[in-house]
Amino acid sequence: MDYNKIVTATIEVFRKCDVHSFPIDCEDLLKYYGYRLFSYKELRDRSPELYSLSLGYSEDAFRAGGSKIVAYNPDRPHGRIRFSLMHELGHHVLEHTGVSDQNEKEANAFASHILAPRMAIHYSRCKNANDVARLFDMSFEAADNAFIDYRRWHRNVVMYKMSATDKAMYAHFYNKDQKCFVWSKQNCCFCGTVLYNSVESHCKICSLPPAPKEQYQYTGGYYDDNDRILQRQHLKWLYDF
């Protein structure tokens, strides 16, 4: 398998779809390429014939290239659905025709690399498959395979330095203002401040006050997270005043 071709294809998708943060939005990527997304139940209601065809093809996901439809099984685990959707996108981007083991392997590799580029795994400092699954919104099985391949990639970079494809990946995710490779860009869930490369959903200012070492009793119950959130809102009101 030509991994360079696979990774180059993912970089092209990142560029076209303006992807600069993980986890990616699978539905947005499919929409960019003109696909409509349906669950198998929705497809059954719309087109029983196509629904029967999809079940015969796969119990996970199905792509009807001519109709620009991707359907998926909503009963599958969330991470598996994401992988299946990107697998189907891989068939489109890699311009596969017909059904073959080689095409399936390439589509699987595409899904793995677009969900969790090995360089993004490196800069997010993932230590194991659990980290990859959490930060890139993948199933543990897919994350484990990605992390194993990441270690292979890392050995190659250490031994042979970065390839032209690696440099292209780095250039796409390099943020001039932050002066670093950005693998995550999100807004604080409380104040909206932009957070770069943060594993937290809130900024430092909006962080919950540290919990006391020993909870103490007071009228109404224990001092818990809800009380700490209320305390933070109280402090914010004081600051705004």
Image: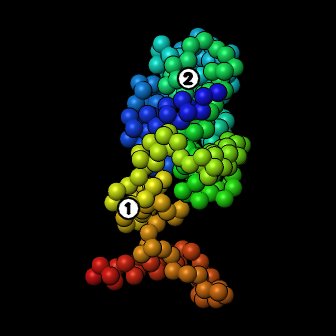
The image quadrant where one finds the N terminus is top right
Callout 1 amino acid: Gln
Query: Within 10 Å of the Cα at label 2, are there few (<14), some (14-19), or many (20+) other Cα atoms?
Result: many
Is residue 137 visible from the viewing direction of this image?
no
Decide which of 33, 183 is in the foreground and name it.
183
Image: 98 above or below 240: above
Q: Could you say where residue 69 lies in the image, as x and y percent from the top left?
A: 49, 21
Q: Position of residue 153 (x, y in %)?
A: 63, 45
Q: Residue furthest left?
A: 241
Q: Residue at x 48, y 60 (%)?
A: 197
Rendering quarter of residue 130: bottom right
Amino acid type, mark 2: His
On the question of residue 188 being in view, the answer is: yes
Q: Which mark is residue 31?
A: none
Q: Residue at x 63, y 42 (%)?
A: 79
Q: Which is more toward the observer, 102 or 195?
A: 102
Q: Quadrant of the C terminus?
A: bottom left
The residue carrying mark 1 is: 178
- The residue carrying mark 2 is 91
Query: Residue at image x 63%, y 31%?
Result: 108
Q: Position of residue 139 (x, y in %)?
A: 67, 44
Q: Nearer the viewer, residue 80 or 240?
A: 80
Query: Taking 49 as reference, is 227 above or below it?
Result: below
Helix, strand or loop at label 1? It is: loop
Mark with earlier residue (1, 2): 2
Measure how far apart labels 1 and 2 are at the Cα level: 35 Å
Q: Is residue 150 above or below residue 61?
A: below
Query: What residue is drawn where x is 55% and y is 33%?
Result: 4
**Front label number (1 vs 2):** 1
Between residues 165 and 189, which one lies in front from this camera angle? Answer: 165
Left or right of 129? Residue 26 is left
